[in-house]
Amino acid sequence: MNSDAISQKYNGLLQTLLSERNSEGFWSGRLSTSALATAVGIVALKVAGSSADRHRTDDGFAWLCRNINSDGGFGDTSDSLSNVSTTLLCYAAVSYCQTGDNGLATLKAMEKWLSEKGITIDSGSVTGSILKFYGSDYTFSLPILSMLILCEVIPASSIEKIPRLPFELTLLPSSFYRFLNLRVVSYALPALIGVGIYLHRNRKKGFLRRGVIRDRFVKPSVNKLTGLVPASGGFLEAIPLTGFVSMCLIASGESDNIIVSKGLEFLRVQQRDDGGWPIDTDLSTWVTTLSVKALGGQISQALTNDEIEKLRNHLLNLQYTTRHPFNDAKPGGWGWTSYSGSVPDADDTPGAILALLEMYSGSQEEIIAIENGCNWLIDLQNNDGGFPTFCRGWGKLPFDRSCADLTGHALLALLKTAEKLNRDISPLILAKIDRSILKATVYLTKHQSDDGSWLPLWFGNQFTGDKTNPVYGTAKVGIYLSDCLAFQRPERELINRLTRLVNKARVYLLTQQNADGSWGGGTGVPGTIEETSLAVSALVAGHNEACGRGVKWLGKQEKITSSPIGLYFALLWYDEKMYPLIYYTEALRRFLR
């Protein structure tokens, strides 16, 4: 592709990106329909037992039967490889929700696939297999096993083999959670309570095993959970989490409360016309800030002043200004969606700060919002210098620890704030930012692999050996740090340290490019638009030949199709319609610049 053709392609992508805004002027995106979410959704509605939901369970059941993989298993999305957890949940849902034997063929196909993985439904091996797969993290393994018992796929006696969840510990102040062995990630407290109560209530009776003392904590725990229910009814806006909690409370005799009534209504609202459910309502704040970043310095040419003001006000209105009831997070952060089930996190908060800085008009409202966002990030930073997603200091389970991509994102947001607003914010905040940046740089240095790569936390690749995605992680951190190198504020020593990290990352990315010019999750892994676009964006400074080959490969793609590279609640795969469009647009903008 010559420069004119690339410019023409960029302009086309830009117009497509702008056309994806909703009627309110921001981007909503569209998450892939999820087999796992659909299975949980129809089971929760059937457990509730309302005849008015019969058509919903039938539609979801039909979606599952239509979307089984050719090998007889189910993946998390229609384009995902089959996996044991999703296949077992789909087996339970089809078995439980079928009418007569209209699910028989689908069940037989799943049984064959599971048997090839060494799992026979009636062998008693299911419980042990699930517990072994998820190890010490009970966030997802125990809800899966609970649903299998509810659907009578495994015998009720299996509950005696399932570890207890200490639901009563959630009654302690949230500041204690980091010191307790809760065995679930910080954002899954509703599952800890709902599933924990179900497991407790349905164990064998008897003074010692039943736990008379624990009975006394059920009602207070339900009351605690009631206080966490968002206006939408969906915990974290997540269909699986809300469905698991709803079905477990109903099966525990705790259905007469707002948790269940609002949770079931949330599930009804989220079902799509084709009968399926997405994993979550949407990632609107995330894709909106990514879109603003993709436009970069050209945003004032792409959007009118009124459109920019509308976007700016939208983001300002989404910042949390009080402590969050879900996890007691301090004010100042942003979550991933405009819906009420969202929780502030350390990827959307720097994303919002950077988007506001890109659209900055100089108002006091913006300055205060950005200051508060920076303070929120700094307060979240772990002692190791890295940034976790939701809660400082949990760190033991996979999705609670510090990670490189969030740390790089936070570092860029903090440094760009100091660069752009150094005359408008207090010296005290500037000093805090400088200290935080140094700590984050130490973390990134320590956690960059010898080959120059970083691993992301919330993204993976199905086709790498360990399902990680070092290309995504390295490209993301590389882009963040490369952007930092253009600033004037950092001292020479910091610039030198960041430069060494960036150069090492670029060397890694160059070694991962496929012969056809694309990038996948690692060397030899089939390329995707997302990973190729990100790699190009990370390499545009000084690696024109490799980027040119990447751009040429992108230009050959007939359709902009998304790939399941996103990881969600307990390692669930998803794809997002906006990712390839956003990253492709940004790559060509940077390449042309």
Image (tube, rainbow, N blue to C red):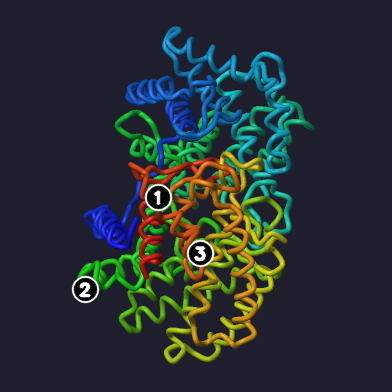
Q: Position of residue 399 (x, y in %)?
A: 62, 52
Residue 539 badge: 3
Of helix, strand and loop, which one carries label 2?
helix
Residue 305 badge: 2
Disc 3 from disc 1: Cα separation? 15 Å
User: Do tag 2 and tag 3 residues touch (Cβ < 8 Å)?
Assistant: no
Q: Position of residue 169 (x, y in %)?
A: 68, 50
Residue 554 badge: 1
Q: Position of residue 127 (x, y in %)?
A: 69, 26
Q: Residue furthest top?
A: 100
Q: What residue type is disc 3 on?
A: Leu
Residue 233 showing in the rendered view: no
Left or right of 55? Residue 386 is right
- On screen, residue 77 above or below 390: above
Q: What residue type is disc 2 on?
A: Asn
Mark 2 surroundings within 10 Å by alpha-carbon count, few (fewer than 14), some (14 through 19), many (20 or more): few
Name which residue lies at 35% across and 34% down: 271
- Does label 2 or label 3 sit earlier along the sequence? 2
Specify the quadrant that holds the C terminus: bottom left
Of helix, strand and loop, which one carries label 3?
helix
Q: What residue type is disc 1 on?
A: Leu
Residue 144 showing in the rendered view: yes
Of helix, strand and loop, which one carries label 1?
helix
Most foreground residue, 67 or 51 = 67
| Nearer to us: label 2 or label 3 | 3
Disc 1 from disc 2: Cα separation? 32 Å
